[in-house]
Image (spheres, coloured by chain):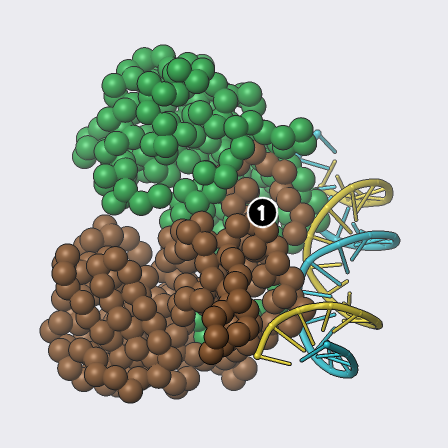
Chain colours: A green, B brown, C cyan, D yellow
Amino acid sequence: MKSYNQYCTVARALDVVGDRWVLLIVRELLTFGPSRYSDLKRGLPGIATNLLAERLKTMESDGLIEHRVAPAPVGSPVYELTDRGRALDDVLSALTRWGLPTMPSGPSANDAVQPQWTALFAGLTLHEGLAPDQRITLGIRTDGGAVRVALDPDGFAIERGLDDEVDVTLAGPDQLVGGVLAGLLTVREAKDLGLEINGGTALLADLVTSARTKVGDRG
Amino acid sequence: MKSYNQYCTVARALDVVGDRWVLLIVRELLTFGPSRYSDLKRGLPGIATNLLAERLKTMESDGLIEHRVAPAPVGSPVYELTDRGRALDDVLSALTRWGLPTMPSGPSANDAVQPQWTALFAGLTLHEGLAPDQRITLGIRTDGGAVRVALDPDGFAIERGLDDEVDVTLAGPDQLVGGVLAGLLTVREAKDLGLEINGGTALLADLVTSARTKVGDRG
DNA sequence: CCGCATCCGGGGCGATACTG
DNA sequence: CAGTATCGCCCCGGATGCGG
């Protein structure tokens, strides 16, 4: 994209991340860590293949990502965030919090739905509230499938699928799962609206409230 | 812009604010409050007049801004943020913090420079650290001109010009002013590099450190 | 099949001109 | 001052091709 040519931090940031798809590519890499081209394409329904290739190049030259050839079993290129790219988590957090109230109660007809998009929100917001040695695993099951979120005080990890044992599982519409995680709905309210919660509901409630107080209860 | 058609809070937020110029228009309105068309155009060097007009329309239909005809002395339309639009301050804060480290020490040849862009950063970040009844006025003077920032615990106000009495004045390159405000440079370091500070330098130092601890020292 | 590169139509963007 | 109108151009999006 053409530069704004303004000596302003916001304009300069947008010179780099303002291009279409860039922040969503960061979202995918922040969610699953190092990913292959086809993984990214799968997580970005609607992107044209040439655009993905082009964005990856400019994002690399801008210092947001790096690519390397994965060792033996994979053998194909793998893309991952640099520290600089990972630092965009705050931007994605802010956008997520801002966008949440506008989410319709369900996806519209031609909306793609993938559970990691809700899981990323969980990872970004909840791990801040954990006690120094606390580790919690979360299961999320929505229309699009199921994922597993492992939270620790320093970060989070998201994996596709949900075969493993987790501390709490949230199953139901994305809107309800997101609403609970954001603290817009209480656990009780969400249950009444049809969210299914298995495991430590008290743990979940504590997690949400402590995350909210930890970041200053904005949003 | 075309929708991403993804049932994801980030994608949905970008459907609204991902269009070129939108977040910079929010920046201007967040900086000076209700503004006229020509004010916006002046604060957005490089924007085409048809694009500004079109963006204002879609931003209004998206609920980010409202326009009304100003009373007697002005008589012309005035645009202002809705609560929903003002809630984008977190997004701009995050972008600002992320963009700051990449700012070159000075503007390049064809970069526009305006002091309110640094002032907005001051307003967004510093007012959070104030004590309940504390009010501080800040003067900022850079190559592009001078502005006055009035901080109170609940928000901030920025005015063009600097004729009034202020508590502290920072004069020098934007990079140094921003560096001090962000806590990347100490007051002493910035002074050594050429930043001129008049008034309560201790007050300024306290302001910066308390703002950083208040928001959790990220960035 | 995976990882791109190339081609092509449509629309957003940017500059200028023009009007009430 | 506050926009509207017009017109290239380039970016985006969709399809296709092609080597490993």
Rendered position, B84 above or below B182: above
At 48% across and 28% down in the image, what residue appears? Answer: A175
Res. D3 image quadrant: bottom right
Residue bearing mark 1 = B15
Left or right, A23 with respect to B116, comes to right
A73, B166: nearer the viewer? B166
Q: Position of residue A129 (x, y in %)?
A: 25, 36
Quadrant for residue B158, please give it: bottom left
Image position of B19 (left or right of B141): right
* Residue plotted at (64% across, 44% down): B3
- Is residue A155 or residue B163 the one in the foreground? B163
Q: Residues within 10 Å of mark 1 (few under 14, many from 20)?
A: some
Q: Chain of mark 1?
A: B
Look at the image and tell me in which quarter the N terminus of chain A lies. Answer: bottom right
- Residue A213 can be seen, yes or no: yes
State the residue in front, D17 or B73. Answer: B73
Residue at screen point 41% across, 55% down: B86
Q: Up-down: is C14 above or below A165?
A: below
Q: Position of residue A173 (x, y in %)?
A: 50, 22
Point 52% across, 45% down: residue: B13
Asked if one can make out residue A14 in the rendered structure from this viewpoint, the answer is: no
* A214 relative position to A45: left or right: left
Q: Secondary structure at mark 1?
A: helix
Question: Could you tell me how many numbered marks the image carries?
Answer: 1
Give the image location of residue A170, x and y in percent.
Answer: 41, 19
Residue D9 screen position, x and y as percent? 77, 70
Farthest front residue in view: B72
Q: Amino acid at mark 1?
A: Asp
A126 to B63, vertically: above or below: above
Residue most toward the left? B202
